[in-house]
Amino acid sequence: MRKPTKLLCCLLVLLTGCARQAPPDTVRGAPAPQDRLVLYTSHKEEVYQPIVTEFESRTGIWVEVVPGGTNELLARLEQEQDAPQADVMFGGGVDSLEAYSHCFTPYFCEDWDVLDPAMRSSIGLWTPFSALPVVLIYNTKLVDPARLTDWPDLFSPAWQGRIAFCDPSVSGSSFTGLVTLLQAVGADMDETLQTFAVHLDGHQLEHSEQVLDAVADGTDLVGITLEETALKRAAAGGEIGLVYPDGGTSCIPDAGALVAGAPHPENAQLFLDFIAGLDVQQRLESEFSRRPIRKTPVPGTLPALDSIPLLEYDVVWASENHNKILMSWAFYLGGGEAS
Amino acid sequence: MKPACSFRTRLFAGFLLASLLPLLLCSALLLQVFRVQLERQVESECQEYLDHVSQSLTALYDGFSQTARALQASPYISPILAERQYENAMVYTELYSATEGKRSHARFDLYDSSGSCLYSTGSALRQQPLPTRWGILYAAQQTDGLAVAPAEGGDGDAAPLLQAAACLTDADGKAAGYLVATITRAQFHQQLDGTYGSRNDLLLLDRYWRPIYTSQTSLADSLAPLLRERLLAGQPLEQTGSEFFYRTAFLQEPGLYLVLQCPQTFNQASRRLLATVAAGSALICVILSVLMSLRLSRQMFRPIQSLHRAISQVVQNNLDVCIAPERNDELGQLAQRFNGMVAALKQNQKQLVENQRELNEAQIRMLQAQLNPHFLCNTLDTMKWISKINQMPQVALMSTDLADILRFCISPDEFVPLRREVEILHRYMEIQSIRLSGRCRFEVDLPPELEDCMVPKMILQPIVENAVLHGLDGVENGVVQVRARQRAAPEHLHIEVADNGHGIPPELAGPYVRPAASGAHSHLGLYNVDTILKKHYGPACGLWLARRAEQPGTVVTAVLPLRKEEPSC
């Protein structure tokens, strides 16, 4: 190829090559790093969105929300431990958070003193958001409430095969429910697990939402779930009644926790202050059907926490025996028998 | 025909380059110019739209601020709100006069300090109190001016979309109540519809890029989070190859972002169309180039091919070829010259053939001439012996001489020593002496150093014969003298044959000139000798005629170069 031809080719390439212009300058308005907060949350959008919006408008901090399941997000946090992306893990029962305590750094929120002592972490590992008692539910049309007052009532032959219960390996709340059952019954763990499995007839649900669906539409008669979801469904007109078991139930808070090595720790602390703060807690019951965790009871329609019989839920035992319980459960549900 | 093919290919490539390159350059340039122009136009259009929407929203905001200031300035409103009085006509009068001309854009409500709605320009009071520790009222407390926030409430057209609130304070600066302006989706739509281009979509985002209003409801869930994500990731809003591009504007006062989504001016379809047109043109170019190159190369190639064919014919010795003259250009001239050249060649060849034929004939003649003389010689020898037997010594002598002369004549040598030539002259003169009964004498003056000179055979006999037959005709005591002399510089041999006869007419003196045709026969001998000498040695040699000075008679001088050996031809 001779020189002029080469030159022409170059020109041609140049002309056609710049057919795309460079993109316009970066958009104004992108926040500076110190004005950002990365939030991993297992809450539903209807819960986190109003809180995040209000937080943004009050503090001027841009919140990047990464939604996901509790276990999924915790696993991700553990993976990212060397270079954490998230500032706050928002959501998940404190038993789950405790299990991943190495991913978090303690922080005592502004209002730590005025939080219910039963609901706060003694070392400040997590900041509670709302209290979530485990409750029994029943279909108001098909079940006489008098026949379901306590945990052992679940073993009545009347509910054989018609108990709505979610796979505890999938749902954290279902696991909490199972441990509460074990602790409330108080008998040998394996025996109780086997008895319960026999009463389920090997049938468990894949999603915690399905527990409410199954009871509300009469597929199942009774179920185990959290107070919050049951109240919400009942408020939406579902045929669901709540029972706080006489023998006591657990009341594990869900919480937010400051990620160890968070890129924006100050903003994360502001956020944790905010979720335990008065303004958010006051709206918990009315807006989210959740139970606040401050000492001073907030006037509302929920039965006071004092009036609900509570168990001493052993979070540490539950986390330590997490895998063992799940393994035994899977064994008995599959038709295994206690030795 | 490989060379022709390569020529054609080169011609084609040249045409292709000459036609395709400008086309492509031109297309690319035009495309570029067109695109830049279009983009500039669209850009300015977008800017206009954005400006228009910004102005419209800023005006709305200013209107609300004005209302808030007017209500704040009113001496009645704050105290009455602080006392939570319902249905006060004075408040309504003030509210309506302050919202004059703005009520079609929004609904205005007055709330007391606990968040209960007391007055409204809408049809009914809002039953649901607004939280004062949350949302818009809380934001209003935190700012001196208007707080703006997206309103929560459904998706329908009548659902509230955007709220602006101002805190109305009492004399002590404490919050006495709130003014809240609520714009529904329908009102917003009405306000902005048609101001941002029919093909574009508008997104109104809050300070943190959360959607408040989108011209298509679905965009709030699909596009707005995506844009926010890109903004936070520091990426440009439009991804390469996307169908849309985005222009943003920030409204400082209400703290809102406007994002205009516009379809790419150069979308896939138009790009494909332009590419098709360009490819089509290029194809036409290629076809034209092929046709042109074929045609031109054929025009060029045909005469060259006929020339080539003709040359092949010539190489095969066919000289009858002729290229038909078809054109008058350089190729036509070339053909004409070729024709001329072939004609000349043909002529030369003809000449050559003729010469060859003549040569052959001469050779045949010579061979024929050589056939019989041996028989003649033998016959003459026989005659000699018969004459001797029959006592006829003269016949015997003549026969012997004649046989010697004959042998000399038919010998294959072309050149002979001068001595031999003189010897033959003696034989000849013996015959002549017998014939003339001794009336003629023969004298030879040949210096010994010249005896070996080589001369053409039989050049002296014709001269001597001429002298005897013509010069001495009827002369008594005739003498024929032959004298050979060397002349220097250049070395020439002069052989003079002198007689004492009648002499030649004076006009014949000088170099021998062939006389006119009438007397030709008589001098054929001289003519032959002169021709032989000239042919052998060039025009400087030949015969020279002269009259003798002091006595009658003629001297014929043969001039030839002095050579001791046979000349090579």
Image (cartoon, coloured by chain):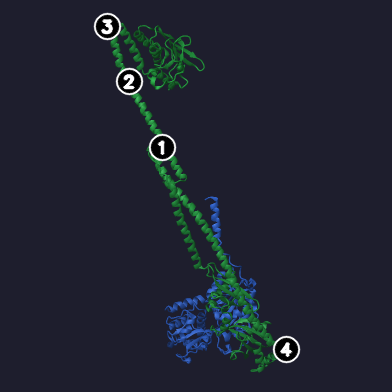
The residues bearing labels 1 and 4 have C-alpha atoms spaced at a distance of 131 Å
Instruction: Decide: is B247 above or below B445.
Output: below
Give how far across and how far down residue B309 sits, in percent: 39, 43
The image quadrant that residue B78 belongs to is bottom right
The image quadrant that residue B110 belongs to is bottom right
Q: Earlier in the sequence, mark 2 or mark 4?
A: 4
Chain at numbered mark 3: B
Q: Earlier in the sequence, mark 1 or mark 4?
A: 4
Chain B appears what colour? Answer: green
Q: Which residue in the protein does label 3 denote? A: B389
How many marks can you see? 4
Specify whether disc 2 shares its chain with disc 4: yes
* 2 and 1 marks in contact (CB < 8 Å): no
Q: Which residue in the protein does label 4 denote? A: B171
Query: Could you say whether the residue bearing mark 1 is in a helix, strand or loop?
Result: helix
Residue ID at (34%, 12%):
B404
Quarter of the image with the C terminus of chain A in it: bottom left
Drawn side of residue B305 relative to residue A230, left or right? left
Instruction: Estimate how packed mark 4 is, as few (under 14), some (14 to 19) or many (20 or more) residues with alpha carbons within 10 Å.
Output: few
Q: Which residue in the protein does label 1 denote? A: B343
